Amino acid sequence: MSSPLGSFLVPPGFGGPSGVRALAREASTVSEAARLLRRSREDRRARSVLPYAGPHRVSAHDPVVLVPGFMAGDSTLRGMALFLRREGFRTYRSQIHVNVGCTREAADRLERRLETIAVRRGRKVTVVGHSLGGMLARGLAARRPDLVEGIVALGSPVLAPGAVHRLLAWDARLLARLNGAGLRGLMGADCFGGDCARLSWEDSRLPLSAEQSFTAVYSRRDGIVDWRACLDPAATHVEVRTSHCGMAVDPVVLDHVLAALRRQQLSRASRSAAPSDEVGSRRAARR
C-alpha cells in the first residue's frame, strides 16, 4: 500500500526507521517517564525543606511556548512545563489538544497565540517543539522573527518530514481517509502530499535571523523518524540516547532544553550590554 506522504518530503539520502525493532526502542519511553517522575519527587522533597523566601525561589519571567508532536497534545509536555517553571521560565501551552489538524491552520493559530503572549509579556517568545511541533516552531521563527527569540526542536525531521516509520505513514493515511469521509478538523491528503504539505515544509526551511537561537535535539535510537533529518545546518545539534516519544519526558532531554534556554538568556544579555555601534557593525557584517 502506497504512502500518502509526498515524495518531496523524503529527499534522496533519507529513509525512515523500519521494522519491529525500531518500534521496540520506543518502549523505553516508559522508563524515561519513570525517571522524570522520580526526579520530580526528589526535587519536591529537596524544595520542601527550604524557606519560602530566598534566592532559591526563582520568579518566572521569560515566556516559553511548548508545542506537542503529531497525534499528541499539550498534556504530553506537562512534565516539561513544570520543570521549566521551577527553573524560572513562564511556560504556555500551544492550545493544541491533539496535533492532527491541518499544519497550515495549526501554524496560523500558533502564530496568533505567540502574538498574544508577546504582547502580554512585552517581549519575544521562545518555542520548544517536539517532533512536528518543532517543525511548526522552525517555520514560525523564520516567518516571524519579531515574535520568536529562539527555538528548541526535539526529534524534528526538518530536512525530511516524510522520513518516518511506516506506522506513522499508516496513521497519516487513516487521517486522510477520515478527512475525505467528511470528518473535519483532521489532516487531509493535501496536508500530507499536496500544496499544503509543500508550503509547510518550505516554511520550515526558510533562513532564520542571525539573532535567533536554534537548538536541535536528536537521537540515533529514534524509532519514529530518521535522526539524520533532524540535523538542520542552522541549528546547534545535541545528541541524546532516548526514544522519539521519550524526548518529551526524559530528564536528560529536559536538562538540554534548560541549557539551551540559559544560553539564549546569556546571548541576549550580551547583546544588551554591547555598545549600540558594535551591535550595528555586527548586523552590517552579517548582511
Image: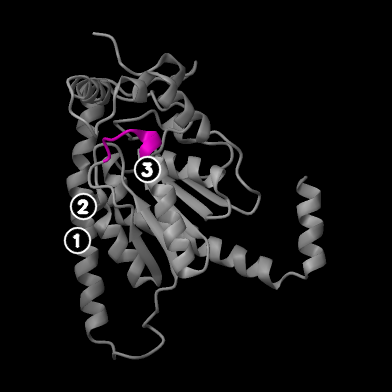
Q: Is residue 11 visible to us here?
A: yes
Dot label at residue 37: 1
Residue under pointer 3? 133
What range is drawn magenta here? 99-105
> What residue do we see at 18% from left, 55% from top?
34
- Residue situated in front as seen by the camera: 254 or 118: 118
| Image colouring | one colour
Q: In the rendered structure, are the residues bearing label 2 and label 1 in contact, judged by CB atoms less than 8 Å apart?
A: yes
Residue under pointer 2? 33
Distance (Cα) linking label 2 and label 1 = 6 Å
Dot label at residue 68: none
Category of crowding for the residue at label 3, using alpha-carbon neighbours closer than 10 angstroms: few (below 14), some (14–19), many (at least 20): many
Distance (Cα) linking label 1 and label 3 = 23 Å
- Which three-letter amino acid code belongs to the residue tagged 1? Leu
- Residue situated in front as seen by the camera: 181 or 150: 181
SS under mark 3? helix
- Which three-letter amino acid code belongs to the residue tagged 2? Ala
Is residue 269 found left or right of 238 in the rendered image? right
Magenta span has 115?
no
Residue 227 at what x, y percent from top left?
Answer: 41, 32
